[in-house]
Amino acid sequence: MDRTRLKQSQVVPVVALDDPDVAVPLADALLAGGIGVIELTLRTPRAFDVIDALRQADHPIMLGVGTVINTQQVERCAALAVDFIVTPGTTAKLVDAIQANNVAAIPGISTVGEAVAMIERGFDLVKFFPAEAAGGVGALKAIGGPLPDLSFMPTGGIGRDDVRRYLDLSSVVCVGGSWVADKTALANHDWSTITQNARSATAL
């Protein structure tokens, strides 16, 4: 996984898409604004068709797949050669599937115990989710304090005005957020607004 691109983008757009025809224009708009990564979630019936559309286009954006919660989804992501997967929470069975399929992953955690469990399984970058509901920046500081070698991608309820507070933490590589490619802009195919949002995100 190219962590440099995550750091450069600062905000990873978390997007639920159900139209494969939108995948490439969206990715183009994000790249034009300086964001080189996207997390497409498995929250829509045609999510894998959207992911496949980006793969078939050989698009240069770094492709992550989120809301991965079972072995079958891990296997399918591996078959599509996505760049990384993201889980909302992480069980031992899910980690087994991730490692068996040799796919890069950012496993989801929300407690110190879960974070330590991921360190034990060899991960040094995790998703803190749901960030705001789980205590926000204060909770993340507390979790990360005794785990100096662990890095985080906080996601969940983080708005544009919250991003800087998270990025100021040395343990935070990037922040996941849906506001860069919000539902209204996507519905209207308003690529210029998404590009501007991406520029704002990378300027934070």
Image: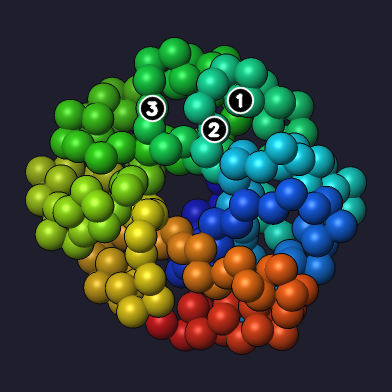
- Residue 120 relative to residue 94: left or right: left
Q: Which residue is mark 2?
A: 68
Q: Could you say whether the residue bearing mark 3 is in a helix, strand or loop?
A: loop
- Residue 117 relative to residue 200: left or right: left
| Residue at 80%, 61% in the rendered image | 22
- Residue 20 relative to residue 135: left or right: right
**Crowd around label 2: few <14 · some 14–19 · many ≥20 (10 Å):** many
State yes or no: discs 2 and 1 in contact (Cβ < 8 Å). Answer: yes
> Would you place residue 132 above or below residue 182 in this image?
above
Residue 120 point in image, percent of width and height: 28, 23
Residue 127 point in image, percent of width and height: 37, 45
Q: Please name the amino acid that badge 3 sits on.
A: Thr
Gap in Å between the C-alphas at discs 2 and 1?
A: 7 Å
Q: From this viewpoint, is residue 32 visible?
A: no
- Residue 81 relative to residue 172: left or right: right
> Would you place residue 184 above or below residue 116 in this image?
below
Gap in Å between the C-alphas at discs 1 and 3?
A: 12 Å
Q: Nearer the viewer, residue 14 or 120?
A: 14
Q: From this viewpoint, is residue 53 visible?
A: yes
Q: Which residue is mark 3?
A: 90
Q: Give the mark nearer the N terminus: 1 vs 3.
A: 1
> Would you place residue 19 above or below residue 9 in this image?
above
**Crowd around label 3: few <14 · some 14–19 · many ≥20 (10 Å):** many
Figure quadrant of residue 194:
bottom right
Q: Please name the amino acid that badge 2 sits on.
A: Val
Q: Which residue is mark 1?
A: 74
Q: Give the mark nearer the N terminus: 2 vs 3.
A: 2
Residue 59 point in image, percent of width and height: 81, 57
Q: Give the mark nearer the N terminus: 2 vs 1.
A: 2
Quarter of the image where the N terminus is located:
top right
Quarter of the image where the C terminus is located:
bottom left
